[in-house]
Image: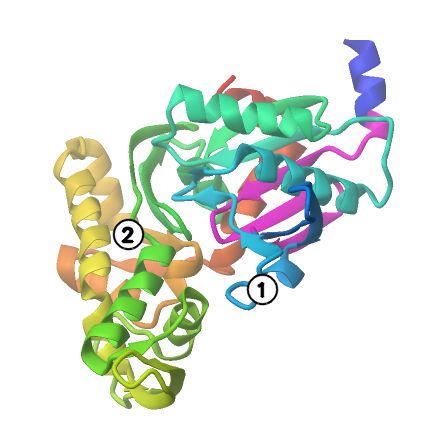
Amino acid sequence: MILDQIIGFFSSDMSIDLGTANTLVLVKGRGIIINEPSVVAIQSDKTGKQRILAVGQEAKNMLGKTPGSIQAIRPMKDGVIADFDMTEKMIRYFIEKAHKRKSFLRPRIIICVPYGLTQVERKAVRESAMSAGAREVFLIEEPMAAAIGADLPVREPKGSLVIDIGGGTTEIGVVSLGGLVISKSIRTAGDKIDMAIVDYVKKKYNLLIGERAGEEIKIEIGSAIALEEPLSAIVKGRDQVSGLLSRIELSSEDVRDATKEPIKEIADALKDVLEIMPPDLAGDIVENGIVLTGGGALIRGFDKYLSDLVKLPVFVAEEPLLAVAKGTGRALEEIELLQHLANE
């Protein structure tokens, strides 16, 4: 125990928000030091041997633009590990980048996982981090981390409801007395919203665009409600009829029409949680409202869309993209809280 405390003093314990879209790394005492896309670019030689070419933002810039010998891979899909080997390499890269050296003192790491993760998937996450150089690995569930990061009173005997809309999953959690009372995870989130835009542009305008372009459109002009002043964006791609390169002007109304199904799925999941809410907690939620975190919280009017639907106040957390990472960081700072929340 004493030896572990001494090792902990010299090593840089860290928390990782290992997301489908982005990975954030927070080092104890230093705050968030890495915020990069969860993408790995690999190059294969003639013998089939692979080497890491780039990780993070540099790798994401290669998506859809690589020659045959190079692949840009997203090793996380729908909040879970789709490629174990690449996930391990990505985690190792971020650990070494955070340490700025290949330290002989291995860090203790806390990693956020979706609520609906199976035991097999949890084991894969833990083993991936251990193989990448962790001394000890704790897993906590994203709704709890998001609630902590959004400054909700998680330890008090009152209910707080948080919706974390990430890249691969949407996590809905009701938190009280330091635990998750109700939780629901669905694999409808930012990625599915992006793909809905890609499919819509293909069907309505016969224009083929990439998933990255879908994400850029969502960020630039996406909205969940009708805007007083509609937005528009020029979209470039390949016409699937003529085969020629082309461009169109897409409106925010187009995007709202394109994304209505995945947005409705998120709203339906919220309704499911509200329908099974214990009466005493329901009173707290009516009084305190609902908090949105994650990248999806930044979609214009999403808070109003949900508020109008469930007739409750809905708020976007301060710095919603960082809420989960901040929550894991606070758990790391408070060992008692960490041990309480960790799913070992």
Question: Which residue ends up furthest to the front in the rendered image?
Answer: 46
User: Residue 184, can we see it?
Assistant: yes
Residue under label 2: 289
Residue 328: horizontal and vertical position, in percent? 57, 38
Question: Which residue ends up furthest to the top in the rendered image?
Answer: 1
Name which residue lies at 60% across and 31% down: 110
User: Residue 334, can we see it?
Assistant: no
Residue type, label 1: Thr
Residue 149: horizontal and vertical position, in percent? 51, 46
Residues shaded magenta: 9-38
Residue type, label 2: Gly
Residue 203: horizontal and vertical position, in percent? 20, 74
**In the picture, which quadrant includes the N terminus?**
top right
On residue 66, the disc is: 1
For residue 136, which quarter of the picture?
top right
Name which residue lies at 32% across and 89% down: 248
Residue 326: horizontal and vertical position, in percent? 57, 46
Is residue 35 one of those drawn in magenta?
yes
Q: Is residue 63 left or right of residue 273?
A: right
On residue 258, the disc is: none
Name which residue lies at 37% across and 89% down: 246
Q: CA distance from mark 1 to mark 2?
A: 46 Å
Tell me the chief SS of the magenta region: strand
Of the pair 102 and 267, the residue shown nearer to us = 102
Vertical side of 256 occupied by 2: above or below: above
Name which residue lies at 76% across and 42% down: 29
Q: Residues within 10 Å of mark 2 (few under 14, many from 20)?
A: some
Of the pair 166 and 339, the residue shown nearer to us = 166
Q: Secondary structure at mark 1?
A: loop
Vertical side of 281 occupied by 77: above or below: below
Q: Residues within 10 Å of mark 1 (few under 14, many from 20)?
A: few
